[in-house]
Amino acid sequence: NRYSRITGTGSFLPPRRVTNAELAAQLAATGVETSDEWIVERTGIRARHFAERDVGSSDLGLEAAKHALEMAGRQASEIDLIIVATSTPDMVFPSTATILQNKLGIAGCPAFDVQAVCSGFVYALTVADAMIRTGTASKALVIGAEVFSRLLDFNDRTTCVLFGDGAGAVVLEASDTPGILASDLHADGKHVEILCVPGGVYGGKVHGNPLLRMDGQAVFKLAVGVLESAARATLAKAGKTDADIDWLIPHQANIRIMQGTAKKLKLPMDKLVVTVDRHGNTSAASIPLAMDEAVRSGKVKKGDTLMLEGVGGGFTWGAVLLDF
Ligand code: ACO
């Protein structure tokens, strides 16, 4: 039997760290009122990182990829598939994955982007797993990379305090023993309006609002329910139960959503990996960023069973259960 298994993780945050207090002071200068207290109480976020203007998702993803390759003990030249999950690509086309491939100094292997917003990493990991199982690839780089700061409306305090920039990556390799045990992916396009960047490029101009819009309460209500059902479906497919989960690594959007899901899965809060306090919501990058932190800090050990789960615009949602 042919399976896929993670052999390395990596991540990268742009150096500019912006605390809630700094962001609140910047926003106050333009008449937008917020506070550290409000942001911490409603979201758990204390700081986020913002990339400089000339830094794109491929640059952040490249650094994360190099760290993952190093941990896996692999050279870039050994990689035979690159998938980048992003909703903030460097360009309309070509894909961020092809740009990143060139920056890695390699050529020839397939490279493409997956766009499922905050669920992007679980989507990309599922696609890579399927391609490895069928023999289309044997050593994949799966990357989540975002510069969400570019999409933020800094006049809208209900959204601009929530997001940050960053990237995370894994090397996923063919293996005789199972790493990825099961996954469960979904989408429901009728919820487009509650979380979107509605603008598009047309005839050389941007038509419609090119900044992020969100109905936070509607997102919140949907998120906890679908995350529980995806996690349960994934466990059922793998023949496992809640008790088999060593670590829950959810998309890092809001501490209350994450704690709500952990509670529904009857997991103690110390099995929840949390980075949202320091990273904010980095969309498709948040899960691999959190996983890499948990691996490098020694929390996640070889053989641990991890539940990854994400939910985001579309609406899209899904979960992946794996043995690390
Ligand atoms: N600072 C101060 N006050 C604010 C801010 C802010 N940054 N933002 C909103 N408020 C005010 C509102 O104007 C409102 O004031 P009012 O009562 O006078 O009208 C009040 O705070 C309460 O606003 P609500 O929207 O009811 O606040 P809520 O408790 O729902 O929290 C939040 C908002 C944090 C967005 C929450 O709904 C949430 O987390 N939703 C989930 C959305 C999410 O996490 N999205 C991430 C992207 S989706 C994804 O990744 C899956």
Image: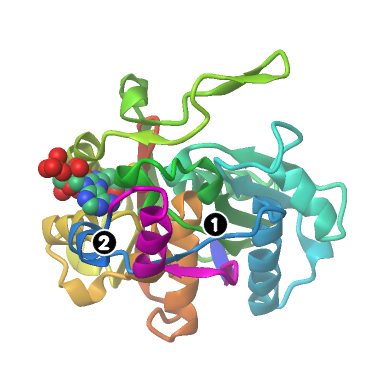
Residue 69 position within the rendered picture, expressed as x and y whole percent measured from the top left: 69, 71
Q: Amino acid at mark 1?
A: Tyr
Q: Residue at x 39, y 41 (%)?
A: 155
Q: Position of residue 227 (x, y in %)?
A: 25, 46
Whether residue 115 is situated above or below residue 190 in the rendered picture: below
Distance Cα–Cα, label 2 vs label 1: 48 Å
Q: Which residue is mark 2?
A: 35
**Residue drawn at x 52%, y 29% as measured from the top left:** 210
Residue shown at 34%/24% (left/top)?
193
In the image, residue 243 sits, relative to residue 57, either above or below, namely below
Q: Nearer the viewer, residue 11 or 55?
A: 55
Q: Is mark 2 within 8 Å of ligand 1?
A: yes
What is the residue that sits farthest to the bottom in this orientation? 298
Q: From the viewer's perspective, tell me whether residue 73 is left or right of residue 268.
A: right
Q: Nearer the viewer, residue 170 or 126?
A: 170
Where does label 1 land, which residue? 3
Q: Which residues are magenta?
A: 9-33
Residue type, mark 2 in image: Ser
| Residue 31 on the magenta span | yes
